[in-house]
Structure formats: C-alpha cells, structure tokens
C-alpha cells in the first residue's frame, strides 16, 4: 500500500523530499496501529499527539493525499500554523560555515548563498544548467510551483564548481538526506571550534532567508526580491521588509547627503551604498543612512 502511494506521488511529480516525508508519516501511523481507512482514528491520534502544529499539518497533508489516492475524503481537523520569523545569521557566520565544510558541501552552500535557491532545487541542478563561460546558473526545475530563475554566478562559485567531478549528469549526485547529515556534522564541529552556538541554528533554508533580507536592504525593491526568489505571491515576500528594518537598524532619520555632477561620481556613490533621491538644477542628490 505504501509502495503504491509512493509511486502515486512520484507520478504526480512531487519532490523526492516530500515523497519521503509523506511516506514516512503514513508508515508511522501504521506502526502506531492507526487505521488508515478510518479518518476518525487519525483524528484521535492527532488529538493526543504532543507535537507542533506544523508537524500535525504535515500529517494532515500526507493523509489527505493518501485518502485522495483511495478515492476517499475526510474533514480534516483544524490546524493553525503560525509562521515564525526565521533566524538571520551574519554574513561572517555564513562564510565561516562555507569555509569550514568539505569541498562538495562548501560548494553547495556557496551556491545557496548567491542564488537563494532551495536545497532541493540545488540538488536537482545538472551540469547543463551551468554556463561556465558566461558565469550563469539556470534553474528550470523549481520547487513549490515557483518560477524558473536565472542567476549570475561569482568567479568564486564558478571556480568551486570547476573543482567538482563531472562524472554524472547532476552537479550534486548525492541524496539530499546524506548532504544534510554531512552538513549537520560539519556545523556541529565548527560551532564548537569557533565557540559560536548560533551556527547550529543555520539550516540550508537559512541561506535563502539571509539572501532575501540582504537583497531587500540593497535594493529596497520588494518586487525584485519576489522575482529573485521565484515567489508567485507577493505575500510570501513581504516578510523580508520587516526583517530588513530590524536587522539593519534603519530607525534613524539621519542621512549623509552627497551631490554628483557626472557619471563617475554617480558610480562612486552607488558603489559605497548611497541611493538616488532627486535631481535639481542639473545636480543629482544621493543619501545614505548614518
């Protein structure tokens, strides 16, 4: 029954991680002697379960798909999942992790840092998705119904990718679960070595949150951040406005003002973080928070 359910999810093009999670949940229910063909016993199990609402929500989603596969329906119990604010590390902490991991994992992390793609999306990348000459990474197999994206890669990332073996079609051929295990081991070792327990709070998805927050700080363009992340709905992106305001402490109304007269002066101001304000009498005004 579980094998048939797994195959059903695969035919419906669910991600390998989702298939693994949902199948594992149904197996747990089965081992707990929950009758999978009786929704009321599933509700009783959920009512007694001392787990987070997010975990219960995952069980409900998996069981709903299982019933649908059997041509059955149910009225799922109420489950309110409150979205928590993500942990945003410093760039130094991100770089410490990248530098301290092995060659393959550090390349994987550098890719997440620059592109903010999901770990599952990174694990699907193939060598044909990378244009080494023009330093471009193309994501044509996004997850969660996101939009396809294309990114410029740094020279550092291209050099790291060039160091990996190209014996298989995929850039990162290992299973994502194995990569997570390797990353967890390296993270624990580095947190102890650097005496920084904050590193233990960094997951693969943390890189996405960090990049999105930084991008909004640099551009103040939430639509650009939305497209960069591949979000279909702007509501999913608005979170980063709140995070950026607090993390970069932009509560002060004091600015340093500079005037540019020519393209070279404009370029210099933009490179050090000034933003354009207006033009008056042929002069361009820029400002930056103190």
Image (cartoon, grey):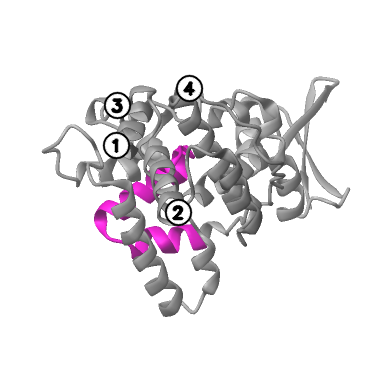
Q: Which residue is mark 4?
A: 71
- The numbered dot on residue 248 is none
Q: Nearer the viewer, mark 4 or mark 3?
A: 4
| Precedes in sequence: disc 3 or disc 1 | 1
Residue annotated with mark 3: 129
First in sequence: mark 2 vs mark 4 = 2
Which residues are the magenta region?
93-119
49 vs 183, left or right, is right
Depth-wise, is mark 3 or mark 2 nearer the camera? 2
Kindly report the distance in space between the C-alpha atoms of the residues bearing marks 3 and 1.
Answer: 32 Å
Q: Secondary structure at mark 1?
A: helix
Q: In front: 125, or 257?
A: 125
User: In front here: 281 or 163?
Assistant: 163
Left or right of 122, for residue 168: left
Q: Mark on residue 3?
A: 1
Q: Main secondary structure of the magenta part?
A: helix
Read off the residue under disc 2.
33
Mark 4: give few (<14), some (14-19) or many (20+) Cα within 10 Å: few
Q: Does residue 221 show up?
A: no
User: Is residue 32 visible in this depiction of the protein?
Assistant: yes
User: How far across and down, in percent of the image, does residue 14 sit?
Assistant: 40, 30
| Distance between mark 4 and mark 3 Cα atoms | 39 Å
């Amino acid at each position: 029954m579980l094998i048939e359910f797994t195959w059903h999810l695969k035919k419906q093009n669910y991600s390998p991680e989702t298939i693994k999670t949902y199948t594992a949940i149904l197996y747990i229910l089965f081992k707990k002697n929950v009758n999978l063909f009786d929704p009321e016993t599933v509700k009783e199990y959920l009512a007694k379960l001392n787990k987070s609402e997010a975990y219960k929500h995952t069980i409900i989603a998996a069981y709903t798909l299982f019933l649908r596969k059997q041509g059955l329906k149910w009225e799922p119990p109420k489950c309110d999942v409150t979205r928590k604010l993500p942990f945003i590390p410093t760039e130094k902490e991100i770089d410490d992790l990248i530098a301290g991991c092995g060659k393959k994992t550090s390349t994987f992390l550098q890719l997440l840092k620059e592109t903010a793609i999901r770990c599952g999306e990174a694990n699907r990348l193939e060598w044909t998705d990378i244009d080494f000459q023009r330093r471009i990474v193309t994501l044509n197999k996004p997850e969660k119904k996101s939009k396809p994206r294309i990114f410029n890669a740094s020279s550092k990332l291209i050099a790291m990718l060039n160091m990996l073996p190209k014996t298989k079609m995929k850039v990162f051929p290992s299973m994502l679960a194995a990569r997570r295990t390797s990353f967890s081991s390296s993270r624990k070792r580095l947190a102890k070595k650097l005496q920084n327990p904050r590193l233990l709070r960094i997951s693969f998805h943390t890189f996405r949150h960090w990049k999105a927050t930084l991008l909004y700080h640099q551009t103040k363009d939430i639509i650009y951040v939305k497209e960069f992340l591949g979000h279909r709905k702007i509501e999913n992106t608005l979170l980063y406005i709140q995070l950026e305001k607090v993390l970069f402490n932009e509560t002060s109304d004091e600015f340093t003002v500079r005037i540019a007269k020519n393209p070279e002066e404009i370029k210099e101001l933009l490179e050090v973080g000034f933003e354009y304000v207006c033009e008056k009498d042929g002069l361009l005004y820029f400002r930056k928070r103190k």
